[in-house]
Image (cartoon, rainbow, N blue to C red):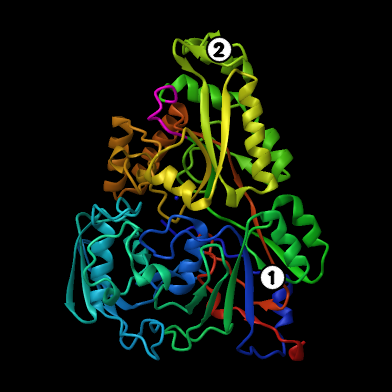
Amino acid sequence: MKPKRFILILLSACFLGLSWTGFSQERGGTLVYGEYGAPIRLVPVLANDSISIRLIELIYGSLVYYDTSGEIKGDLAESWEVSDDMKRITFYLRKNVRWHPLPGEAEGALFNAEDVVKTYNIMMNPKTLTPLQSRYSFIGSVQKLDDYTVVFRLKKPLLNVLGRFSFKILPSSLLRDIRFLRGDEDLLLYKHPIGTGPYKFVSQEGSSAEIVLTVNENYHLGEPYIEKIVMRPFADQNIITQTLLYGGIDLQIRVPPREIAEIQGDQRFDLYPYSTLSYSFFGYNLRNPVLGIKEVRKAIAYAINRQEMLNSFFEGKGQLISGPFAPGSWAYNLDVEPIPYSPETANRLLDVAGFTERTDDGVRKRGSYTLEFSMIVPISKENETTKRVILAFQNYLKDVGIRINLEWLEWKTWTEAVFIDHEFDIVYADWLFDDSFDISSLFHSSEIGPGKNNFGAYKNPEIDTLLDEARATLDVEKKRTIYRKLHEILAEESPYTYLWTLTNYAAFNRDLRRVEIHPTRFFTYIKDWYIQNEEQQ
């Protein structure tokens, strides 16, 4: 997966500012954008992949959101009051907001307080397969006072608490007999998402087919300019750039580093970096007793040349990291250095762990245990860059006597293997952070189980205590001190091999104007995007 919220909104001001002069903003047009892979589930409570999260931002609404300056604004909440003791928040909801109509209906149901209460109760039900529960454990209860007033009572005061209420709201009318969600229910909401957001779901023919959305003309924050949005999935990320260059799509969410120069040289497109609070890592399933040995995990980290991989596969457009927080955030401990490349140290650690014998083909072993692990990789990420990272990892470990067996899975199968069934040894993945930097869901022992983010089953009582203390304090400096300690311990413990954070680049046709990008949800500000038509040019 602010103290002031960390949002980096990058306007292409150098070309956008002057190009608007003298042109009216016409409504209409279709925006086609490309993703590598398809969404897993377009249900906010269950979504845990970036493709789904971006689409959910288009379809669903929340109580509040952050605007481009980092200020909290009302979405489905018109206003709110925070009690003097900061333990009670009352939200006054907008009236006359309608849910998107059901298929075959002309008008949707009215949004009201029951939708907020139902969403929260489903999200926090222990049987719901969601990683969100730890993030909202500070809430004690929610109460509907009337159709347009809800009160959240908090277990304890929390810094910058209002920003936490950006979770997406579900329609209670479609969930009347539902108390929890696991993803395998026969629900209309899974097949045809119904939200209150700027765009309405129209169709998706098959799990890997393109998704079509149309504008919500009655959107309560103002009708968007762009009439239709199409998400086109690709099996290989490298094809997306070529499709952009040949006019098959208008927007590429994330350009591979090797293809940036090609787009920069084409005057039809604009390209700029945007910041995401994220990092890449190799994650380990500590249910495997061999991976439960810290020396083995540390040896893996020393055995791989991460700087060489960053330079070779990502054109050096990023930085190595040393721990579990997003670099660039106030939570990151700069005093902890990334683990250097040292096969000698890796071999020494493996000797210390007792893996001194070798099989006939050179794999280290200790008694009946061999250093042989399965690594599962989602096919939707089977682009050239990812394959190079995985194969390099495999070769680096072979040099120190560790065998990695690769298995390529469909994206949905991969997520179930990792988050539900825990049938893996090693994964290559990314975490994308919001503003809180609360890593409890990643490393707290209470977050082990199906549907939760501590998929590697990492347990450490000291880490649990520190995470609990960090969430309980209102003292920013104390929280910073705790996070620095967490960073130090989790770097030493190595439940992950922390790799790098990358600079992301979006590319789009210059006919697309007033583009502003939210770092984690991407489309938050799409209401104001518009397409410059040929007559205006």
Can see residue 376?
A: yes
Give how far across and how far down residue 11 sits, in percent.
64, 69
Report if residue 142 lies within the magenta region. Answer: no
Density class for disc 1 (Cα within 10 Å; few <14, some 14-19, many ≥20) is: many
Density class for disc 2 (Cα within 10 Å; few <14, some 14-19, many ≥20) is: some
Indicate the quadrant where residue 489 lies.
top left
Numbered range of the magenta stretch: 284-291
Give how far across and how far down residue 328 sits, in percent.
54, 48
Q: Amino acid at mark 2?
A: Arg
Give how far across and how far down residue 176 sits, in percent.
23, 72
Which residue is situated farthest in the top direction here? 357
Q: Amino acid at mark 1?
A: Ile
Q: Which numbered disc covers residue 249?
A: 1
Q: CA distance from mark 1 to mark 2?
A: 51 Å
Can see residue 514?
A: no
| Prevalent SS, magenta region | loop
Q: Which residue is mark 2?
A: 348
Quarter of the figure that contains the C terminus: bottom right
